[in-house]
Amino acid sequence: MAKITPTSAIIIVTIMLNLQHLLNSNYLFTVNHDQFIEMFATFCGLLNIFLIVRQSNWNFLFGFLNAAAFFFLFQHQKIYADMGLHFCYMAFQLYGYYQWRLGGTKHHGVHVKYADARHFSTALGAIVVLALTLIYILSHYTDSTRIGLDASSSAICLVAQWMMSKKWIQNWWLWLVADVIAITLYLYKGLYFTSGLYAIYILMCLIGLYRWHQTWKLAKAA
């Protein structure tokens, strides 16, 4: 019998609860265009992070579909920084796939490790610069409704995605912070499926952090 991991159990329970809610409320028969895209992106996102935790290269396919769906959703919702962020996500899926398959000094794919202090400090500095740049752009050139949350979440996620492509373990730390900010933003916008997705992300990030750390420990001990 196949072993059910904690990550698998979280995804199965989440899908069952969402399906039960949809069937009981007749939601499937009244869903609008944005809600359909949101549901599609939600399930692709769950599969994406599940596969990331397991270090499967298939994560990039569902990551691309997730990013493309959210790009169109956020365009309609006028969350412009996140719209641009998910366009970058689509590009990062290609970059990440290359890194996981052919990256590293010997082009055999990158391995799980902790970023050194210099690289991690650079990443944190990049978040500050990106956030300030986005705040300026959003406040002067768009009608974004939640500039601070929008810009901060986007900056953290963008750097975390880059770190994930490198298989740096600290990417999970950044995702945890970004997920808390994102839940606040999406609840305000009424994107409840997306908010639920990010709540599940928090649990899965903790599992991913633990599993990647264990992988690093085993490799270091070998």
Image: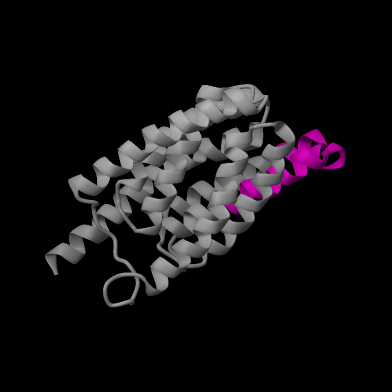
| Residue 43 belongs to the span the image colors magenta | yes
Left or right of 154 in this view: 212: left
Q: Quadrant of residue 62?
A: bottom right
Left or right of 186 in this view: 132: left
In the image, residue 185 sits, relative to residue 15, either above or below, namely: above
In the image, residue 77 sits, relative to residue 145, either above or below, namely: below
Left or right of 136 in this view: 206: left
Q: Position of residue 58 (x, y in %)?
A: 52, 67
Could you tell me what secondary structure mostly forms the magenta stretch?
Answer: helix
Q: Which residues are magenta?
A: 20-47
Q: Position of residue 73 (x, y in %)?
A: 70, 41
* Residue 132 visible to an observer of this rendering: yes
Left or right of 117 in this view: 153: right
Image point (75%, 39%), residue name:
35
Type of colouring: one colour
Q: Position of residue 30 (x, y in %)?
A: 86, 37
| Residue 45 belongs to the span the image colors magenta | yes
Outermost residue, left side: 221
* Residue 183 visible to an observer of this rendering: no
Image point (30%, 46%), residue name:
170
Image point (65%, 45%), residue name:
70
Name the one closer to the observer, 193 or 110: 110
Name the one closer to the observer, 169 or 53: 169
Q: Quadrant of residue 106?
A: bottom left
Image label count: 0
Outermost residue, front side: 140
Name the one closer to the observer, 71 or 209: 71
Image point (58%, 47%), residue name:
86
Task: Give the quadrant of the C terminus.
Answer: bottom left
